[in-house]
Image (tube, rainbow, N blue to C red):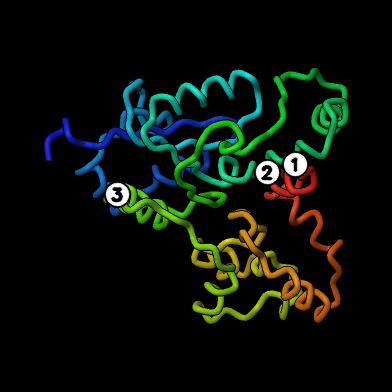
Amino acid sequence: MSDKKKVRIAFFDFADCEGCQLQLTYLNLNFLGLLEHCEIVNFREAMSEASDEYDLVFVEGSIMRPHDEERVKKIRSIAKILVAYGACACTGGVNGLRRRFTDDEAKEIVYKDRPWTIEAGWPRPVHEVVKVDYYIHGCPTNNDETVKAVKSILLGKGYTPPDYSVCIECKFKENVCLFEKGQVCMGPVTRAGCGAWCTSSLNTCYGCRGLLSNPAEEGHMEILAKHGYTIDTLKQKFDLYNMCRLEAEKNG
């Protein structure tokens, strides 16, 4: 395939830690194989060259400030396909916690007596600002899923992330439920696709891949009750990655 026919891929970041892009800079032979069919034209973490011509765009980070909104709209106007990449882009991520506080409260918590040095804004997942074609969830994203998604998109099949719970993947891994080990886990209501990444390492699921579109709330409540927990126990765990969605649902 000639270079002229290669799909031009660009990565852009907004309010985030850029950890999802860093994932792709690690040795990943599967991803390198995709370069036979693609050309990376924007990737600040790995190259200094940049182009304003691209086909497939990965947007990492939540949209917070007015100039973020202007920038992502310009990117969307050029891109043929836009992928929300990582928790901050897909759900607002940890940045969504900012919605809990006023400017003064946030300033007191973060800076106290030091100068307020950043332009703060209202965090939003990318789809609240521009049309998103596909989503790759996670904090950070899983390279195997990213490669799978890119291949499927390049073949014209698109990509739909799993909409079943992390518990399913835990069962396939034959993991002992973390609730049985005295840990509170978000797995029953969190979208799968990570391969039970955290729970297989004996760490709890924090819900970084976002809530299921139709979570089995009653089932989760039964699990909590069985182990002596209440919904209040989960409040802050839900908020950590899903504050934007919860606020949107609350406001209708």
> Label 3, on which residue?
156
**Which residue is nearer to you in this view: 4 or 131?**
131
> Amino acid type of disc 1?
Leu
Tell me: 133 left or right of 106. Answer: left
> Label 2, on which residue?
94
* Residue at 39 percent of width and 37 percent of height: 81
> Label 1, on which residue?
97
Q: Quadrant of residue 208?
A: bottom right
Q: Nearer the viewer, mark 1 or mark 3?
A: 3
Tell me: 133 left or right of 178. Answer: left
Count of labels shown? 3
What's the distance in space between the residues labelled 1 and 3, CA to CA?
Answer: 36 Å
Q: Residue furthest front?
A: 252
> Amino acid type of disc 3?
Gly
* Quadrant containing the C terminus in the rendered view: top right
Q: Nearer the viewer, mark 2 or mark 3?
A: 3
**Which residue is nearer to you in this view: 220 or 26?**
220
Secondary structure beneath label 3:
loop
Q: Position of residue 78 (x, y in %)?
A: 39, 25
> Crowding at label 3, few (<14), some or many (≥20) Cα neighbours within 10 Å?
few
